């Protein structure tokens, strides 16, 4: 079981919503401490994220419109892991679609739960190096409203500390990448 999982006893399962990117379910469970109850959970196939860094030491991020927060968020390129897809394949596709760069060198930074209080989504984080700007980037998703942003690690840290909207997966991955950025 990945990431220290300890399964509860499933007493009753009901799927409430099956979506394009995730499912939502409510389950009656008996937890390892023997407490029983109903809990809601978003079931997500996982996401893969790249921390791209140019030869000049600039981080490649995107400022993306997110309908759920009704605004633009600064984040590293990322995407949902498709069925039977390796997370590295996911992030290699996403970096090209979202930023117009490809990377020749990939290092795994780690993996972590995004919001374990209500979701099983795991983020697989990678460092992307030896970037090349693509002459003709592949078309991105039709619903994506994205602007590519280049920042130094110090500029990103300042943006985070000053309260610019930066998503949690990007902040966590930035921390995992710090030893490569110094």
Image: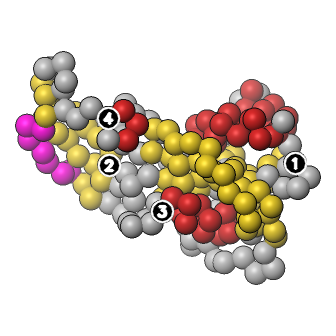
Per the image, the residue denoted by label 3 is 86
As measured in the structure, the alpha-carbon distance from the residue carrying label 1 to the one carrying label 4 is 37 Å
Q: Residue at x 45, y 66 (%)?
A: 85
Q: Which residue is mark 4?
A: 5
Residue carrying label 2 = 43
Q: Earlier in the sequence, mark 1 or mark 2?
A: 2
Query: Tag 1: Cα neighbours inside 10 Å, few (<14), some, or many (≥20)?
Result: some
Q: Is residue 140 left or right of residue 105?
A: left
Q: Give the mark nearest the N terminus, 1 or 3.
A: 1
Quadrant of the image containing the C terminus: top right
Foreground label between 1 and 4:
4
Kindly state the secondary structure of the residue where label 2 is placed: strand
What colour scheme governs how the chains and residues are painted in the rendered image of this protein? secondary structure
Contact check, label 1 and label 4, Cβ < 8 Å: no
Q: Earlier in the sequence, mark 1 or mark 4?
A: 4
- Within 10 Å of disc 3 (Cα), the crowding (few <14, some 14-19, many 20+) is few
Real-space CA distance between mark 1 and mark 2, rounded to the nearest whole angstrom: 36 Å
Query: What is the magenta range?
Result: 10-16
Image: 3 above or below 87: above
Camera-nearest residue between 178 and 73:
178
Label 4: few (<14), some (14–19) or many (≥20) C-alpha neighbours in 10 Å: few
Measured as percent of width and height from the top left, residue 45 is found at: 39, 55
Is 24 drawn above or below residue 159 in the view shown? below
């Amino acid at each position: 079981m990945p990431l220290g999982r300890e399964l509860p006893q499933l007493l009753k399962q009901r799927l409430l919503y099956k979506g394009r990117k995730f499912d939502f379910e409510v389950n009656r469970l008996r937890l390892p401490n023997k407490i029983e109850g109903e809990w809601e959970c978003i079931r997500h196939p996982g996401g893969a994220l790249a921390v791209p860094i140019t030869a000049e030491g600039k981080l490649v991020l995107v400022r993306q419109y997110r309908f759920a927060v009704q605004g633009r968020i600064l984040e590293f390129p990322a995407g949902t892991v498709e069925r039977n897809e390796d997370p590295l394949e996911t992030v290699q596709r996403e970096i090209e679609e979202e930023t117009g760069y490809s990377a020749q060198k990939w290092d795994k930074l780690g993996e972590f739960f995004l919001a374990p209080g209500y979701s099983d989504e795991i983020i697989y984080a990678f460092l992307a190096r030896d970037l090349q700007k693509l002459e003709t980037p592949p078309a991105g998703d039709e619903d994506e409203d994205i602007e590519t942003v280049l920042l130094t690690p110090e500029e990103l840290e300042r943006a985070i500390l000053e309260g610019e909207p930066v998503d949690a997966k990007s902040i966590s991955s930035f921390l995992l990448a710090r030893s490569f950025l110094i």
